[in-house]
C-alpha cells in the first residue's frame, strides 16, 4: 500500500483485525482504513462501532486519540453523525494529547458538514478552548479555528480578545516550533488597542526571532514588521529594526531554498524599512557557488541598499560579475548598474563610466545589454551623456537581439540632430524591415519619422516607402495604426507632428521599481507565504479567495445601486 500497490481487495480481511489489542497492529489497521475509506465507504462504516468504543477507552489516552484521529481522516459525510457525541467528550478529555487531537478533528469534520458542526456548538467550544491550560491544545485550537473561520475573501474571524491574546502569548513559550508558527500567524491578524499593548506583544513574542527554525523566524519577522506600524516611540522602532538584521542575514546564509524565500521577503522589507540592513551590504555579494536564482535576488537587494556611501563598492562588485561566464547573470549585473545610475543621480557619472567600459569590451551579449541599459539612462538624463553615442554607433554590426536593436533605434531617434549619419544607420535596419520583430519595426518607424521632421529632403522617399510598407504589407495592427497616424500627421500638419513626436517624455525614476503602498502593505502582512514569493496578493492566485473577492465586489455594487435607487426615489418624491 505504501509503495503504490493496490491492496484494496483485502479490505474485509483487514477490517476483521480492528479489534486487536496490539497497539502497533491497530495503528496499521487504522492506516489501511484511512487509505481506502474513500473507495469503500460502505465497508469503512462497519468499523465505526470499534472507533467509538476505542475513543471512550478509559485506560489508554493514546488509543483514544488514535481512534479520534482515524475517524477524522475518513472523508465520508455519513461518519459525522456518529462522531458528534464522541468528539464532544474528547474535547473535554483530561489528557491534553486527546484534546489537541480532537480539536483538529473538529476542523476536518467541519469541511464535511459545516451546518451540523455549527448547530452542535463546536465553534463555541473551540473558542472557549483558546484559554486551555496546555500550550499544544491552544496552538491546535488556533490552527483549527483558522482553518474553519477563514472567509472566502481571505479574512479571519477568530475572535481574539485581550485575554485570549495573553493566553496565546503564554502558550507561545511552551509550544513546539510548528505551534509557534500558528500562534504568531494569528497574532499578526490581531489589532492592538494602543501602542502600549503592541509593545507588550512584541516584547513577549519578539524573542522568537532568534529561533532555530526558519519558519518561526519568518513568522516573527512578519509580526514585528506589522506591529512596527502600531508603535509611536521612534527609539523603540529603531531597536526592533536593528533586531531584524541578524536573523534575516542568518536565513540568507542558509540552504538555497530558504535563502531564496528570505531574499524575496528582504526585498519587500527594504521597500518598507530601507535602513534595516544598511550595514550588512557585503552579506549580499554573490558567491561563486550560489545558484543563479540566488544571485539574481541578491542583485535586486544590492540596488535597494545602494547609496552614495557604498556605490563605489557595489560598482566594483558588479564589474566583476560582468566578467562571469553565466550570460544570464552577466546581463542582470549590467542592468543592475543601470538601475543604480537611475536611483542615484549624483553617482550617475560613475555608473555610466562602467557602462562605457562594457561597451568597449566587444563581447556581443555584454554590448547589447549595455545598449539596453543606456537607453534607460538617456531617458533619465537627456543630453547629459552624449559622449557615449560614438561607441554606441560603433557596435551596430553585432546587434542581433530585438530588444537591443529597438533600444539602439530609440537612441538614434532621440539624437537624430546629433548623429550625422543617422540616415545611413537607419537604412541598414530598413533593408530587413519585414523580417524584424514588431518591437524593432515600431522603433524604426518612429526613428524615421523623427529624422524626416529634422531632415526631410534626405529621407523623404525612404520614409514614404516605410509608411506604405507598414500600412499595406504588415499584419501587425499596432504597427499599421501607428503608421496611419504618422502619415496623417505628416500630411496635414508637420508642425503638429513635430510637437507629438518630439514631445517631452516623463523621465523614468527609481520609483519605477517600487510597488504601490497598498500592495506593499498587503505583501508585508503575507511575509513568508507564496504571496511574498509571487509578489502578488493571495486573491490573485488562489481561486477560492479570488471568487470570494469577486462576490464581495458584486455585493458592494448591488448595495451602492440600491442606495442610489432609494435616493432617486426620495428626490422624485420631494
Image: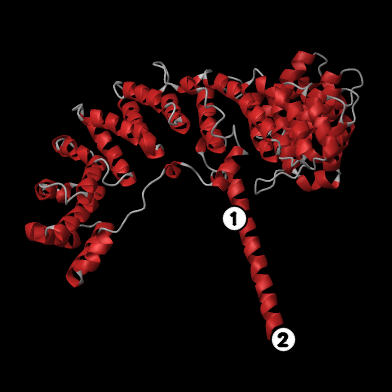
Q: Secondary structure at mark 2?
A: loop
| Spot occupied by residue 331 in the image (x, y as percentages of width and height) | 32, 30
Q: Residue at x 51, y 33 (%)?
A: 267
| Spot occupied by residue 395 in the image (x, y as percentages of width and height) | 16, 35
Q: Residue at x 24, y 57 (%)?
A: 479
Q: Nearer the viewer, mark 1 or mark 2?
A: 2
Mark closer to the chain start, 1 or 2: 1
| Spot occupied by residue 37 in the image (x, y as percentages of width and height) | 69, 32
Q: Which residue bears the numbered disc 1? A: 550
The answer to whether residue 568 is above or below residue 197 is below
Q: Nearer the viewer, residue 478 or 55?
A: 478
| Total count of labels | 2
Q: Nearer the viewer, residue 311 or 457?
A: 311
Q: Residue at x 27, y 34 (%)?
A: 370
Q: Nearer the viewer, residue 186 or 443?
A: 443
Tag of residue 395 = none
Corner quadrant of residue 523 = top right
* Residue 143 visible, this orientation: yes
Tag of residue 574 = 2
Quarter of the image containing the C terminus? bottom right
Amino acid at each position: 500500500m505504501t509503495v503504490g500497490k493496490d491492496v484494496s481487495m483485502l479490505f474485509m480481511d483487514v477490517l476483521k483485525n480492528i479489534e486487536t489489542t496490539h497497539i502497533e497492529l491497530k495503528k496499521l489497521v487504522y492506516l489501511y482504513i484511512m487509505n481506502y475509506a474513500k473507495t469503500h465507504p460502505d465497508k469503512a462504516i462497519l468499523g465505526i462501532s470499534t472507533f467509538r468504543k476505542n475513543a471512550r477507552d478509559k485506560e489508554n489516552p493514546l488509543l483514544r486519540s488514535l481512534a479520534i484521529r482515524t475517524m477524522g481522516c475518513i472523508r465520508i459525510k455519513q461518519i459525522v453523525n456518529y462522531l458528534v457525541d464522541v468528539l464532544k467528550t474528547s474535547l473535554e478529555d483530561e489528557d491534553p494529547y486527546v484534546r489537541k487531537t480532537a480539536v483538529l478533528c473538529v476542523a476536518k469534520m467541519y469541511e464535511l458538514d459545516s451546518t451540523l458542526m455549527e448547530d452542535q456548538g463546536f465553534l463555541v467550544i473551540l473558542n472557549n478552548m483558546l484559554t486551555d491550560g496546555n500550550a499544544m491544545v491552544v496552538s491546535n485550537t488556533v490552527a483549527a479555528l483558522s482553518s474553519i473561520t477563514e472567509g472566502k475573501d481571505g479574512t479571519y474571524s477568530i475572535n481574539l480578545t485581550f485575554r485570549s491574546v495573553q493566553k496565546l502569548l503564554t502558550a507561545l513559550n511552551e509550544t513546539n516550533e510548528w505551534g509557534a508558527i500558528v500562534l504568531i500567524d494569528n497574532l499578526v491578524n490581531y489589532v492592538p488597542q494602543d501602542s502600549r499593548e503592541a509593545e507588550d506583544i512584541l516584547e513577549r513574542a519578539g524573542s522568537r526571532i532568534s529561533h532555530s527554525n526558519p519558519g518561526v523566524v519568518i513568522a516573527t519577522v512578519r509580526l514585528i514588521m506589522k506591529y512596527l506600524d502600531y508603535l509611536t516611540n521612534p527609539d523603540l522602532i529603531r531597536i526592533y529594526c536593528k533586531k531584524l538584521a541578524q536573523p534575516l542575514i542568518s536565513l540568507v546564509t542558509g540552504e538555497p531554498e530558504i535563502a531564496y524565500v528570505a531574499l524575496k521577503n528582504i526585498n519587500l522589507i527594504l521597500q518598507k524599512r530601507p535602513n534595516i540592513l544598511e550595514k550588512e551590504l557585503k552579506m549580499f555579494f554573490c558567491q561563486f557557488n550560489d545558484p543563479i536564482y540566488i544571485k539574481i535576488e541578491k542583485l535586486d537587494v544590492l540596488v535597494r541598499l545602494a547609496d552614495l556611501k557604498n556605490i563605489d563598492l557595489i560598482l566594483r562588485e558588479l564589474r566583476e560579475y560582468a566578467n562571469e561566464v553565466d550570460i544570464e547573470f552577466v546581463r542582470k549585473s549590467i542592468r543592475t548598474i543601470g538601475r543604480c545610475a537611475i536611483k542615484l543621480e549624483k553617482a550617475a557619472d560613475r555608473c555610466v563610466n562602467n557602462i562605457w567600459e562594457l561597451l568597449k569590451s566587444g563581447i556581443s551579449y555584454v554590448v547589447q545589454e549595455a545598449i539596453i541599459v543606456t537607453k534607460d539612462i538617456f531617458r533619465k538624463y537627456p543630453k547629459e551623456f552624449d559622449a557615449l553615442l560614438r561607441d554606441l554607433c560603433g557596435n551596430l554590426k553585432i546587434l542581433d537581439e530585438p530588444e537591443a536593436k529597438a533600444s539602439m533605434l530609440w537612441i538614434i531617434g532621440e539624437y537624430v540632430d546629433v548623429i550625422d549619419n543617422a540616415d545611413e544607420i537607419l537604412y541598414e535596419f530598413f533593408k530587413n524591415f519585414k523580417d524584424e520583430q514588431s518591437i524593432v519595426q515600431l522603433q524604426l518607424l518612429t526613428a524615421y519619422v523623427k529624422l524626416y521632421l529634422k531632415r526631410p529632403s534626405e529621407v523623404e522617399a525612404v520614409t514614404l516607402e516605410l509608411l506604405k510598407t507598414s500600412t499595406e504589407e504588415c499584419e501587425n495592427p499596432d504597427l499599421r495604426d501607428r503608421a496611419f497616424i504618422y502619415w496623417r500627421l505628416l500630411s496635414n500638419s508637420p508642425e503638429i507632428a513635430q510637437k507629438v513626436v518630439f514631445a517631452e517624455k516623463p523621465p523614468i525614476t527609481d520609483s519605477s521599481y517600487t510597488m504601490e503602498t497598498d500592495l506593499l502593505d498587503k505583501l508585508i502582512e503575507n511575509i513568508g507565504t507564496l504571496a511574498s514569493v509571487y509578489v502578488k496578493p493571495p486573491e490573485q492566485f488562489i481561486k477560492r479567495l479570488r471568487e470570494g473577492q469577486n462576490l464581495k465586489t458584486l455585493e458592494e455594487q448591488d448595495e451602492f445601486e440600491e442606495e442610489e435607487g432609494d435616493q432617486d426615489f426620495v428626490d422624485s418624491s420631494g
